[in-house]
Image: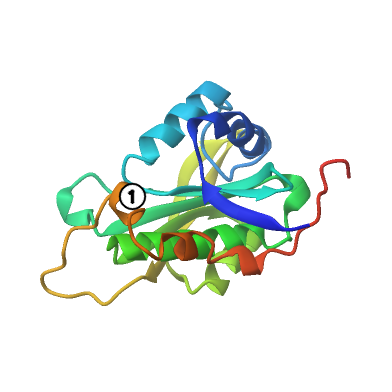
Amino acid sequence: MSGLIRLATPADGVRAADIYRPAVAASAATFELEPPSADEMGRRIEETLRFWPWLVCDVGGHAVGYAYAGKHHQRPGYRWSVNLSVYVDVRFRRSGVATALYTSLLGLVAAQGHVNAYAGIALPNDASVALHEGLGFTAVGVYHQVGHKFGRWHDVGYWERPLAERVSNPSPPVPLQLLRQRADWMSLLQAGTSCLRVADRRNG
């Protein structure tokens, strides 16, 4: 079954909440303690899309994963750097969904004018480490016992990937709405679809 990658809308908050819930409730992949509601996820999507991409992977018209970019730090000197996150429906893991989403997301944030991409991974998480390193990220360090969840402390490793040459006077990154006006917008958005190896597993 073919899949596609598209921009999220606030209406995707329902599926985003479903996909995210196991990561909150049953793992230390995120340090949120209570699964956010569909309305809250819709609000986060809307807020993110004011500047950065939030992407959804659809299989058979059903959202099976999402990935988004966001601010690395508040100070304006950090604005050329972005943090990335990806979450996939447990039934669709190892189907190329995360790779597809990240491939498109990396191309889009680079086209916006960002220079560095970063990801934090609660350790251990061999699958996430393999995903990021397979896409050209390299480890830069570990925050030891920085987050507390499920009665114990967790390390978080950080990975980075350069997106463009670091020049002395970079132009500020452009918002998503300007990027969508480019003639190559659709090719950027769909760049990751060739990575998908999916079948509809909703009843599996």
Q: Position of residue 185 (x, y in %)?
A: 41, 60
Q: On screen, 107 above or below 43?
A: below
Q: Position of residue 67 (x, y in %)?
A: 52, 50
Q: Nearer the viewer, residue 78 or 171?
A: 171
Disc 1 marks a residue whose amino acid type is Leu
Q: Nearer the viewer, residue 187 or 196?
A: 187
Indicate the quadrant containing the N terminus: top left, top right, bottom left or bottom right: bottom right
Indicate the quadrant containing the C terminus: top left, top right, bottom left or bottom right: top right
Q: Position of residue 169 (x, y in %)?
A: 10, 70
x 28%, y 52%: residue? 178
Horizontal side, residue 21 vs residue 178: left or right: right
Residue under label 1: 176
Res 27 quadrant in image: top right
Q: How many numbered discs, if any? A: 1
Q: Estimate how packed mark 1 is, as few (under 14), some (14 to 19) or many (20 or more) residues with alpha carbons within 10 Å.
A: some
Horizontal side, residue 48 vs residue 174: left or right: right
Q: Position of residue 11 (x, y in %)?
A: 54, 29
In the rendered image, is residue 192 in sight? yes
Q: Residue furthest front?
A: 183
Q: Residue furthest right?
A: 204
Q: Secondary structure at mark 1?
A: helix
x 82%, y 42%: residue? 202
x 49%, y 29%: residue? 42
Q: On screen, 29 above or below 172?
A: above
In the rendered image, is residue 159 in sight? no
Q: Residue furthest left?
A: 169
Q: Nearer the viewer, residue 148 or 21?
A: 21
Colour scheme of the rendered structure: rainbow
x 73%, y 60%: residue? 95
Res 23 quadrant in image: top right
